[in-house]
Every structure is written in structure tokens, then in C-alpha cells.
Amino acid sequence: MKRIAVQLRIEGRVQGVGFRYSALSAANRNHLSGWVRNERDGSVSAYCEGTEADVNAFIVWCKKGPPSAHVTSVGIKKLPFRGVFSRFTIEY
């Protein structure tokens, strides 16, 4: 299976609504590795690696987020697969 990596920038009402913890659960359900973190500008960033299908499922989830979030945009940057992460974590 082809493995890919993406960097995401999620904008909208995405901080203070449990986005990172929900993203951690979504990433684990999709067997991804990488990280998610809040940014100073109010957005959330994520980096994930996994199969193309699993990464795409995570992107679909990020476009909606948890019930209390209101996502207005998701920027997607495709990157070379590195395989350096063993699990998905929340960064602070």
C-alpha cells in the first residue's frame, strides 16, 4: 500500500472545542502517525503519515471536526513520506 504524508492547517472555530483530542482519536482510528497542535493565530496544524486511504479519511474528518467546531477551511500540503513517527500525538 502506498504511504503518504500531509501537513494540514485547519481554520475556523477550532480551538477550545476539543479539536486536538478528537483529532487524536480520529487519527488513531485511521492508524496514522504524526501530530496535531494549536497555533497562535487560532488555527490548528496537523502532520500525518499513513496509507493514502487512511490519510484521506482523516482529511475528511478534519473538514468537519468535532460537533462543537466550525471548520471554515483546511489547507493541505502533500509531503514526502518520512516514516519518522511511531504514533499520533498532541503537541503543546
Image (cartoon, helix red, strand yellow):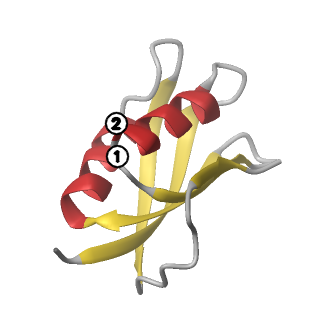
Q: Are marks 1 and 2 in contact (CB under 8 Å)?
A: yes
Q: Residue shown at 26%/65% (left/top)?
A: 51
Q: Is residue 29 above or below residue 76?
A: above
Q: Residue shown at 44%/44% (left/top)?
A: 27
Res 62 quadrant in image: top left
Q: Residue shown at 34%/46% (left/top)?
A: 58
- SS state under label 1: helix
On screen, residue 76 versus residue 56, left or right, reads right
Give residue 24's mark: none
Q: Is residue 81 above or below residue 39?
A: below
What is the CA distance from the residue labelled 1 to the residue labelled 2?
A: 5 Å
Q: Which residue is mark 2?
A: 61
Q: Amino acid at mark 1?
A: Phe
Q: Amino acid at mark 2?
A: Trp
Residue 32 placed where, x, y %? 42, 55
- SS state under label 2: helix
Q: Is residue 55 above or below residue 61?
A: below
Q: Residue shown at 75%/49% (left/top)?
A: 39
For the residue pair 38 and 21, the one nearer the viewer reads as 21
Circle 1 Cα neighbour tier, 10 Å, few/some/many (<14 / 14–19 / ≥20): many
Residue 16 placed where, x, y %? 72, 22
Circle 2 Cα neighbour tier, 10 Å, few/some/many (<14 / 14–19 / ≥20): some
Q: Which residue is mark 1?
A: 58
Q: Is residue 16 above or below residue 77?
A: above
Q: Residue lying farthest front?
A: 86
Residue 30 placed where, x, y %? 33, 45
